[in-house]
Amino acid sequence: MSRTPLDNLTELAREARDQAGQRLAGERRTAAQIIDQLESLQRYRQEYAQKLQAAMRAGIDPASMHNYQRFLASLDDALERARQALAAQQQRVDQSQRHWRQEQRKLSSYDTLAERRAQAQRRAEQRREQRVNDDLVTGRWLRQNAARGER
């Protein structure tokens, strides 16, 4: 069966939708990785803050206290960068999701057109079959009437 331009458009739209879906999946994986990193940083910061609290209860010298505070500040900076990276990645996920939906709508439109075309072809074929059947019945009836007239 030969391919029509609509078949070609449908195939291209399907490929574009699939590529958009793969990109969306990749963006979601990246977001999940960033979330894991953020959670790890949060746990590490909490553990380190608990160590500082324990050291303060045990008595800590000012230099060590300063080192703890500087390290906690650097962890806070890393946490903020991770939050910003997550927000940016979420925007990429949202953009990819909108793109995938757009490609899906385009594919659905082509599929709808193809289905309408197929329905029209089926109706035309049914009408042709009905005409052939009507012609056969009419021909048989005419032959039977002609045969009765000859008697």
Image (spheres, helix red, strand yellow):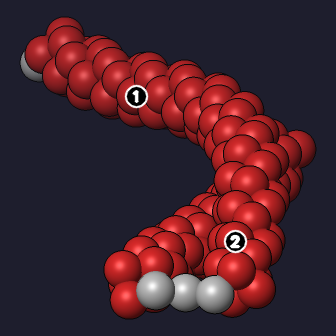
Q: Residue at x 74, y 65 (%)?
A: 73
* Tag count: 2
Instruction: From the image, tell me which residue sits under label 2.
Output: 69
Badge 1: few (under 14), some or many (20 or more) residues near its Cα, within 10 Å?
few
Residue 29, picture quadrant:
bottom right
The answer to whether one can see residue 46 in this image is yes
Residue 62 vertical position relative to residue 7 in the rendered view, above or below: below
Of the numbered discs 1 and 2, the one sitting upstream in the chain is 2
Residue 47 placed where, x, y %?
44, 82
User: Could you tell me residue 67's position as x and y percent?
Assistant: 75, 83
User: In 3D space, how far apart are the residues under numbered discs 1 and 2 (Cα atoms)?
Assistant: 83 Å
Residue at far right of view: 5
| Residue closer to the observer: 137 or 55 | 55
Q: Residues within 10 Å of mark 2 (few under 14, many from 20)?
A: some
Q: Position of residue 129 (x, y in %)?
A: 40, 32
Residue 136, given in percent of the width and then of the height, sits at 33, 29
Residue 82 numbered mark, or none: none
* CB within 8 Å, label 1 to label 2: no
Q: Is residue 38 above or below residue 138?
A: below
Q: Nearer the viewer, mark 1 or mark 2?
A: 2
Dot 2: what SS? helix
Helix, strand or loop for disc 1 = helix
Q: Amino acid at mark 2?
A: Gln
Relative depth, front residue between 96 and 104: 96
Q: Quadrant of the C terminus?
A: top left
Which residue was labeled with disc 1? 126
User: Seen in the image, is 115 located left or right of residue 131?
Assistant: right
Relative side of 70 to 148, left or right: right
Name the residue at 25% across, 23% down: 137
